[in-house]
């Protein structure tokens, strides 16, 4: 099993370790509820080093990424980060990624990309297939670097002070390299929790020291390490899709309610024709949010019913710690997508009333 | 109730066997180890009084934030009482899993042949 630079730290500090996409990762330290609450009210630290970090050293990367990303990459301003999908020519989603255009400390601009751990090998192969001579200068830096997400209302303030950098002044979805303790550190205003926050990418050998420093600086404010369990409940409340659940090769982006992740006009990219065609398809199931009555969560694969008719299926569900009720994302027949529509979720043979609600379930004030 | 006096299934349910008149009554719950492993329990699905359970078969579900897990019956018999009030106070499962955290009372027709004593069960938990 693969280990991040922080895997041993987690195991030594009470992390309950699980295999996640081939990596040994902490699902929780103490209580998912407590870790979740810390992120909503103070801050939590997540080791997200299992995510794939790819660096492109040549300017040709711009053309390559623009051809493969659903979002426009050509002409992206330096310092910006874009959430995008990558599709195959049939419009099936290969991954959801972040594309960074960064000025590195040598003054050169380079593209970086962060991909899902479970899709890293697939995306590397996909990039190689479209750029067999590697004119984009792709290197996989996943193992040489680490990635620490500091998420929560207090996160920016603490990182700001630590780095002596105006992180608060950085726009959301921007990033920059800084020199910190003699090494290059990538700082970005990104995250996957629905809270304000920062993600830090240090060289792997500096990860433990950086993690412990941030944790210590935030100790009085209630910072705590958080695991993949809280990461999942946080992203679900924020209605952020998760690959393998709301996104897959059998789902077309046109049906995923992710219009913001696509630039369709005046450009061409792999999968565009299929997405345009799918937009005309009026009967395909679409992503919606469901709020269930009672306290029993409907989880992935639970059928969504109206009477005896199956109209959809749950792709992710949990008991929402902030909202204190069961929530789910589901793909359902578009005829029933209107907010307020009453449906039933079949949880292992028992029907539970639910309503279609607006996404996200939670948004920070 | 003292955990040392209970019988256990490998799947972390406990049973207290008590003779009441001519009937053998089993009180059933889940172990402190199970509660700790599940973390943040948010819901339980319990059966109804008058129904029956079969040793080794599922009698209900416990939902944590993370996942749903089945609960298996240590005995066969008829359900004579169900602790439905626990649904409004699931915290007692962490505070007192062996007394206030009871889930079912069953008139036993036959116990499971896979019941473990406390020491054997404890050794199994520690090997995890």
Image: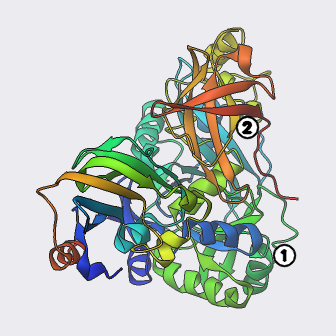
Residue sitting at x 44%, y 83%: A13
Q: Nearer the viewer, residue A139 or A357?
A: A357
In which quadrant is the C terminus of chain A drawn? bottom right
Q: Can you say whether B56 is above or below A331 in the image?
A: below
Quarter where residue B43 is shown: bottom right
Dot 1 falls on which chain?
Answer: A
In which quadrant is the N terminus of chain A drawn? bottom left
Mark 1 neighbour density, 10 Å: few (under 14) some (14–19) many (20 or more): few
Q: How is the image coloured?
A: rainbow
Q: Can you say whether B125 is above or below A172 in the image?
A: below
- Residue A238 visible in rendering: yes
Mark 2 neighbour density, 10 Å: few (under 14) some (14–19) many (20 or more): some
Toward the left, the furthest residue is B113
User: Which percent across, then down, holds residue B58?
Assistant: 31, 45
Secondary element under disc 1, as helix, strand or loop, is loop
- Residue A111 visible in rendering: no
Pointer 1: what residue?
A: A166
Pointer 2: what residue?
A: A74
Residue sitting at x 58%, y 82%: A210
| Viewer-nearest of discs 2 and 1 | 1
């Amino acid at each position: 099993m693969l280990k991040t630079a922080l895997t041993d730290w987690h195991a030594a500090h009470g992390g309950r370790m699980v295999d996640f996409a081939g990596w040994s990762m902490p699902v929780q330290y103490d209580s998912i509820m407590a870790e979740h609450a810390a992120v909503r009210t103070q801050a939590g630290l997540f080791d997200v080093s299992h995510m794939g970090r790819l660096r492109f050293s040549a300017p040709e990367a711009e053309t390559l990424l623009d051809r493969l990303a659903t979002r426009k990459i050509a002409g992206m301003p330096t310092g910006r980060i874009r959430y995008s999908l990558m599709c195959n020519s049939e419009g099936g989603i290969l991954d959801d990624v972040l594309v960074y255009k960064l000025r590195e400390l040598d003054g050169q601009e380079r593209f970086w990309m962060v991909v899902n751990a479970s899709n890293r090998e697939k995306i590397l192969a996909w990039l190689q297939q479209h750029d067999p001579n590697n004119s984009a200068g792709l290197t996989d830096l996943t193992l040489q670097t680490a990635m620490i997400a500091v998420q929560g209302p207090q996160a920016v303030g603490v990182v700001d002070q630590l780095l002596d950098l105006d992180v608060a002044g950085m726009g959301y979805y921007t990033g920059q390299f800084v020199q910190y303790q003699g090494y290059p550190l990538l700082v970005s205003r990104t995250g996957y929790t629905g809270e304000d926050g920062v993600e830090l990418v240090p060289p792997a050998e500096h990860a433990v020291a950086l993690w412990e420093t941030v944790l210590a600086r935030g100790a009085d404010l209630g910072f705590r390490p958080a695991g993949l369990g809280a990461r999942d409940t946080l992203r679900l409340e924020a209605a952020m899709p998760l690959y393998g659940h709301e996104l897959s090769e059998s789902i077309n982006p046109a049906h995923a309610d992710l219009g913001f992740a696509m630039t369709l006009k005046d450009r061409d990219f792999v999968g565009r024709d299929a997405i345009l065609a799918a937009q005309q398809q009026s009967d395909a199931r679409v992503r919606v949010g469901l709020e269930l009555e009672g306290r029993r969560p409907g989880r992935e694969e639970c059928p969504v019913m109206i009477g005896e008719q199956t109209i959809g299926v749950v792709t992710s569900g949990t008991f929402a710690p902030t909202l204190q009720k069961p929530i789910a994302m589901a793909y359902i027949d578009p005829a029933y997508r209107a907010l307020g529509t009453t449906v039933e979720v079949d949880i292992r043979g028992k029907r539970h009333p639910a309503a279609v609600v607006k996404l996200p379930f939670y948004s920070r004030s | 109730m003292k955990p040392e006096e209970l019988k256990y299934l490998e799947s972390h349910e406990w049973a207290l066997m008590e003779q009441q008149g001519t009937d053998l009554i089993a009180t059933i719950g889940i172990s402190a180890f199970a509660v700790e492993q599940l973390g943040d329990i948010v819901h339980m699905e319990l059966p109804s009084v008058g129904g029956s359970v079969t040793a080794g078969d599922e009698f209900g579900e416990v939902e944590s934030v993370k996942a749903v897990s089945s609960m298996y019956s240590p005995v066969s018999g008829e359900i004579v009482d169900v602790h439905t009030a626990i649904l409004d106070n699931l915290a007692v499962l962490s505070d007192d899993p062996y007394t206030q955290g009871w889930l079912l009372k069953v008139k036993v027709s036959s116990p499971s042949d896979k019941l473990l004593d406390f020491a054997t069960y404890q050794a199994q938990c520690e090997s995890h």
